[in-house]
Image: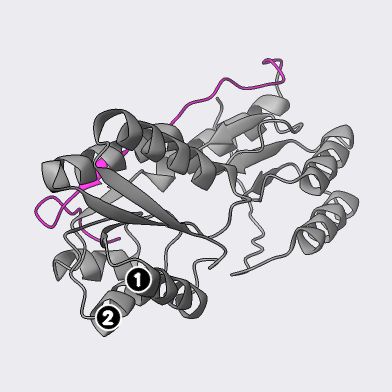
């Protein structure tokens, strides 16, 4: 590709309803842009809005979580199913034949990336570690308040929970729920090296972070958008970023 400059407009929200996201996508389409990089739930109304953008000549690239049945031209992110399988291996080998039960936290069941992680996790646990059970909580939307409430309720209902696979965030709140219940966490696997997870990993409150390079994802997304302006194929083959297992001993320096 020739060198290029992207001027980005950002729209962030901790929680956004599908209808609100559809309105935002339609406003962007009407205003005009050379491309959209999108993290969104995999629901029909969002896919329809993506189709409208594509029909208007605006390429859409999904980031971190995919919309595989939409008109998006590419997905930029990690292999989420492999990430879930990796988490299952780490927890399964750590708990061993002692077994127990894993609290699996999702921010929402509507995100395909989180669903793929959960599918990979359950598959490996079922196949290789049958002594380990799973309890799932969802719809905490990654917020501490909602996730903490859900985690506390799960712990109160199930005395066997002794491990965590955090797909959906809110990790400080999950740990606080264990602390309040005076329950140990034998192993805790989380995703992404944000500021909270860095601090928790350094303090040994969580054991492993599954991390992928967002710079790689951004490069993939921008290359896909640039390809729309060239003679390259309309749909860009996936270029998945690799998942790295981060511990307190190999944590990269913060930016």
Give the image location of residue 187, x and y in percent: 19, 57
Farthest residue toward the bottom?
A: 180
Q: In x, y percent, where is residue 36?
A: 70, 45
User: Would residue 137 be found to the left or right of residue 194 on screen?
Assistant: right
Q: Nearer the viewer, residue 115 or 178?
A: 178
Residue 30 drawn in magenta: no
Q: Which SS class for mark 2?
A: loop
Q: Is residue 57 visible?
A: yes
At x 29% / y 65%, what residue is drawn? 197
Region in magenta:
231-255
Q: Label 2 vs label 1: CA separation?
A: 7 Å
Residue 108: % across, % down: 57, 57
Compared to residue 118, the image places residue 126 above or below, namely: above
| Residue with the mark numbered 2 | 181
Quadrant of the snapshot with the N terminus:
top right
Left or right of residue 27: residue 101: left
Numbered circle sitting on residue 155: 1
Taking the spot 44% from the left edge, 41% from the top edge, the residue there is 117
The C terminus is located in which quarter?
bottom left
Q: Which image quarter: residue 163?
A: bottom left
Q: Report which quarter residue 93 is drawn in.
A: top left
Label 1: element kind: helix
């Amino acid at each position: 590709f020739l060198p290029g400059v992207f001027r980005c407009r950002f729209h962030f929200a901790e929680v956004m309803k599908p209808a609100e996201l559809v309105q935002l996508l339609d406003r962007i389409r009407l205003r005009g842009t050379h491309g959209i990089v999108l993290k969104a739930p995999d629901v029909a109304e969002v896919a329809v809005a993506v189709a409208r953008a594509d029909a208007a000549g605006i390429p859409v690239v999904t980031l971190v979580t995919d919309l595989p049945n939409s008109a998006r031209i590419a997905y930029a992110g990690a292999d989420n199913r492999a990430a879930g399988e990796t988490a299952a291996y780490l927890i399964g080998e750590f708990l061993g034949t002692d077994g127990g039960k894993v609290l699996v936290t999702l921010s929402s069941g509507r995100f395909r990336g989180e669903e793929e992680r959960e599918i990979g996790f359950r598959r490996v646990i079922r196949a290789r570690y049958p002594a380990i059970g799973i309890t799932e909580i969802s719809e905490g939307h990654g917020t501490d308040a909602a996730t903490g409430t859900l985690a506390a309720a799960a712990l109160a209902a199930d005395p066997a929970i002794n491990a965590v696979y955090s797909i959906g965030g809110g990790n400080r709140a999950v740990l606080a729920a264990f602390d309040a219940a005076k329950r140990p966490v034998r192993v805790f696997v989380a995703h992404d090296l944000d500021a909270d997870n860095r601090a928790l990993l350094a303090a040994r409150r969580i054991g492993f972070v599954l991390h992928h390079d967002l710079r790689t994802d951004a490069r993939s997304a921008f290359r896909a958008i640039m390809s729309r302006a060239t003679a390259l194929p309309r749909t860009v083959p996936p270029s998945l970023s690799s998942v790295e297992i981060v511990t307190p001993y190999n944590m990269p320096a913060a930016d």
